Amino acid sequence: METIGQFTIAEEALKEKLNALKAQFELDEIMYLGTCNRVEFIFTVPHFVCPGFTQNFLLALNTGLPEEQVKAISKQAMRLNGDETADHIFRVASSLDSLIIGEREIITQLRTSYEVCEKLGTTGDAIRLLIQSAIRIAKDVYTHTNLSKKPVSVVSIAWRLFQEQQLHHNARIVLVGAGQTVRNFVKFLAEHNYNNVAVFNRSLDNAQSVAAIANGSAHELSALKQEAGDFDALVVCTWATDYIVTESLFHEMASNDKKRVVIDISLPANVDPKIQELEHVHWIDMQVIQEEVKRNISYREEALEDCLKLIEQGKEETRKIFQERHIERAMSQIPATIRDIKNMALDSVFQKEMAQLDPQSRELIEKIIGYMEKKYISVPMKMAKDVLLSAVQNN
């Protein structure tokens, strides 16, 4: 877990990095998914992804880790090809492959990651269809199974543990980060009328967006020491790969020994674990949260069989969608060809005859030909597509 952060890509560097990977490895499409505990690259390439490819790919990320360590990590990395890729992405979206089974944040993270990469222009048809299917299947899993009946998400558990501390509603709550996890935590604060909230983040715009949920204040991360104030609770979750709140910074922020709640829900940790040794600190981190999860996880595991049935069904539907899109792309030249035939007929073959017609007659002829053009494109193409799809599925 501690080395995962070395493979994360900052948003401002994402376009350059993904395009460099596309060029170096001749990828048609690529998408990056980075969360607090996973880094995944989804891409299309016309050959099997072997261990050697994986090693070269991870080395190309220029993580700063020693080459031998990256090579060792590449042997541990999960490599998936073809149908097993779809199976994995559907499990990820449905949170069956999450650190905490049933956490619903992952579906939002997956959608957001796709939207970012789509906007950067690094994705295409294949990844679009895959992610659309994954989100549809995940929604079915959450709606039609017991997987999410007992919440065990990172945020919901962190919130319950926070509530156990019974802080008064004007307690000073400081949050570091502005991602989906922090945003969801702030929603809980707003719903329970906590009115003294401050959000710190590298991007002030993002901090303002999150702080507005609870009518709180927003600050740049660099102002944490000066603006945190005499806080009662500190909640931290970012994509940073090192400690944002060091022991020395914490002592500067917390100058007296009053009780403080510290919640670090980042992987790797963003708060120096030495802080938990302080007598006046009530400490909650991912290890504490995972222990809490174990008390509820058996209930969710009972729903896994139903989830897997929905995923298998979704895989079949997705296979048909990909086959249909493949046929559509193969037939994409037909409309243009028919359009060329129509134009040649009007402009060359029957040019003289058309020129002899009065405007009303010429307009009627063009309308009739236009109607026939549409029908000759849509009807035969639909019939051909149905025949081809049937032949593919029978094989």
Image (tube, rainbow, N blue to C red):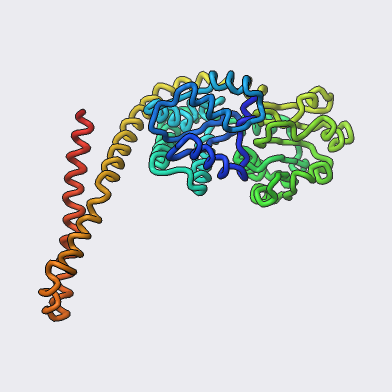
Residue at 40% of width from left, 26% of height from top?
Answer: 48
- Which quadrant does the N terminus fall into? top right
- Total marks placed: 0
In which image quadrant can residue 328 be found?
Answer: top left
Rendered location of residue 70, percent (x, y): 60, 23
Residue closest to the eye, 44 or 158: 44
User: Horizontal and vertical percent for residue 357?
Assistant: 12, 78
Location of the C terminus (image quadrant): top left
Kindly tell me whether residue 253 is visible in this rendering: yes
- In this rendered view, identify the residue nearer to me: 81 or 103: 81
Residue 24 at x, y = what percent?
50, 36
State the residue at coordinates (17%, 70%). 366
Q: In this image, 5 relative to 218: left or right?
A: left
Q: Above or below — where is 181 with respect to 120?
A: above
Where does the image place residue 10, in percent across and percent down from the top left?
Answer: 63, 40
Left or right of 365? Residue 313 is right
260 with respect to 161 (left or right): right
Q: Is residue 98 left or right of residue 240?
A: left
Q: In this rendering, does residue 2 appear at all?
A: no
Residue at 70%, 35% (x, y): give it.
236
**Residue at horizontal 82 percent and vertical 31 percent from the top:** 259
Residue furthest toward the bottom?
A: 358
Q: Quadrant of residue 145?
A: top left
